[in-house]
Image (cartoon, helix red, strand yellow):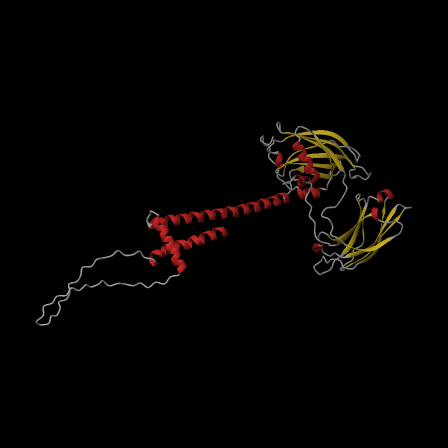
């Protein structure tokens, strides 16, 4: 744009000079011959007869003009050039104006093209950032996005004094809940009704609770809770001390909690210390076991084969420390229940082996809208069956589940087997919201 301005301004000045030149430097007027006026009759003296011839010169006009010598020289130079051009003045001025206009338009086009090119580069960079942020790259498809919260976003929930002691002779862990201070107010009156719930993960076989203290933010508990646990199991366990606000007519609210991995504790002496409460996780980190199955999809025939191989380390649901597990295989289409099948029941085991195959007809157009839900249940002849764990795979899943689904689609006609850790039904239902209305039977779906 700067180059255009430097080129346009001198041409504009030149055009102005050419326009005003005829006014300031007029061409010489052609000579005109005037007929002489008859001389007036001379007065003659009486007695004399004389004749005289008198010539009268035409009147002369004088023009007073003042001009800068440099401008006068420039005008004279330009006038000489124009006299050499065999064209009328108006034609020369028209050609010059058209040339200036074309040069101006060319400069404008160059500037607009440069600006558009810069905007396009900036837009491409923004699209690359958004593409990586949305998780369309191969790394993001396998690994779920993680969000980190800064320390400024954390709310102060209070602190608690606790103690830990392990009695090796009795294989007993004693958790002391001493007192708490500065707890977060959960009631409208600016107070809380706190009590503490203590349990061990991943088994969570026993849950102990302290008594409730009314309308206080600084309760003194002084209670000791014991758990029977071996030395080997102690090293892979985590103790959870959760402070909860009691409410008689609604759901109890969690004020905060402490989690301590027991393999980091020095059991040579009794541990007693203050520690700040932290925000509890959205879902309980609980070991529900693992399941292994294979997936195979043939796009030409539209057949998807699911083979339930085995499961291990399932959660004990019966009083005898065992379970009667079976696996339910379900397909959802557009997040609506579609098809389901189930395996046989394996009696009194936490490590069942199935090796059972199920085939579903899913067209290639539907495979992008289908989710596979695998759930493990404990069979009970008297009461209702209990859910032991759940997992789902599909384009809406994340992590290892999405990687397994992508491997099935990228390797047609070949079975792909993989182990998966079971999750709670609450975790799966929070991600995969299944609509209650069933899909009606239609030949198009099959």
Q: Residue lying farthest right? A: 169
The number of numbered badges drawn on the structure is 0
Q: Residue lying farthest left? A: 47
| The C terminus sits in image quarter | top right
Q: In percent of the image, x 33 and y 56: which residue is there?
A: 22
Percent from the top left, x then y, of residue 163? 84, 53
Query: Toward the viewer: 425 or 368?
Result: 368
User: Against 104, is 40 above or below?
Assistant: below
Percent from the top left, x then y, of residue 186? 72, 57
Q: Is residue 313 left or right of residue 152?
A: right
Percent from the top left, x then y, of residue 387? 73, 39
User: Against 326, is 433 above or below?
Assistant: below
Q: Is residue 431 visible?
A: yes
Query: Toward the viewer: 243 or 195?
Result: 243
Q: Is residue 379 visible?
A: no
Q: Is residue 191 left or right of residue 161?
A: left
Q: Is residue 223 left or right of residue 130?
A: right
User: For residue 342, what is the image quadrant?
Assistant: top right
Query: Toward the viewer: 31 or 44?
Result: 44
Percent from the top left, x then y, of residue 73? 39, 57
Q: In percent of the image, x 36 and y 52: which residue is there?
A: 80
User: Against 39, is 269 above or below?
Assistant: above
User: Against 229, is 381 above or below?
Assistant: above
User: For residue 53, what is the image quadrant?
Assistant: bottom left
Query: Toward the viewer: 80 or 287?
Result: 80
């Amino acid at each position: 744009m700067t180059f255009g301005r430097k080129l346009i301004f001198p041409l504009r000045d030149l055009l102005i000079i050419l326009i005003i030149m005829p006014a300031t430097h007029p061409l010489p007027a052609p000579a005109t011959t005037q007929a002489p006026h008859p001389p007036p009759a001379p007065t003659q003296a009486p007695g004399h007869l004389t004749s005289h011839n008198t010539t009268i010169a035409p009147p002369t006009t004088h023009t007073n003009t003042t001009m800068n010598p440099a401008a006068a020289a420039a005008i004279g130079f330009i006038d000489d050039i124009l006299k050499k051009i065999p064209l009328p003045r108006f034609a020369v001025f028209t050609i010059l104006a058209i040339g200036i206009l074309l040069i101006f338009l060319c400069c404008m086009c160059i500037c607009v093209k440069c600006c558009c090119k810069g905007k396009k580069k900036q837009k491409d960079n923004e699209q690359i950032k958004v593409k990586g942020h949305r998780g369309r790259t191969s790394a993001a498809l396998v690994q779920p996005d993680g969000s980190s919260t800064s320390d400024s976003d954390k709310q102060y929930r209070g602190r608690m004094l606790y103690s830990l002691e392990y009695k090796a002779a009795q294989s007993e862990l004693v958790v002391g809940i001493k007192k708490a201070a500065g707890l977060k107010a959960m009631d409208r009156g600016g107070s809380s009704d706190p009590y503490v719930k203590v349990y061990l993960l991943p088994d969570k076989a026993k849950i102990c609770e302290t008594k409730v203290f009314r309308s206080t933010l600084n309760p003194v508990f002084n209670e000791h809770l014991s758990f029977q646990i071996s030395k080997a199991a102690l090293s892979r366990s985590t103790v959870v001390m959760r402070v909860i606000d009691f409410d008689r007519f609604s759901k109890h609210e969690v004020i905060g909690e402490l989690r301590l991995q027991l393999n980091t504790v020095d059991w040579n002496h009794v541990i007693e210390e203050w520690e700040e409460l932290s925000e509890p996780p959205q879902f309980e980190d609980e070991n529900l076991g693992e399941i292994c199955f294979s997936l195979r999809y043939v796009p030409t025939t539209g057949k998807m084969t699911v083979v339930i191989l085995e499961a291990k380390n399932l959660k004990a649901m019966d009083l005898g420390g065992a379970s009667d597990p079976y696996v339910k295989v379900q397909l959802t289409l557009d997040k609506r229940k579609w098809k389901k099948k189930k395996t046989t029941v394996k009696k009194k085991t936490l490590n069942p082996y199935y090796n059972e195959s199920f085939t579903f007809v899913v067209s290639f157009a539907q495979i992008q809208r289908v989710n596979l839900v695998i759930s493990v249940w404990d069979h009970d002849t008297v009461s209702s069956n209990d859910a032991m764990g759940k997992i789902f795979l599909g384009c809406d899943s994340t992590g290892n589940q999405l990687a397994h689904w992508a491997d099935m689609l990228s390797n047609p006609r070949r079975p792909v087997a993989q182990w998966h850790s079971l999750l709670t039904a609450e975790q799966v239902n929070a991600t995969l919201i299944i609509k209650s209305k069933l899909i009606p039977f239609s030949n198009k779906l099959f």
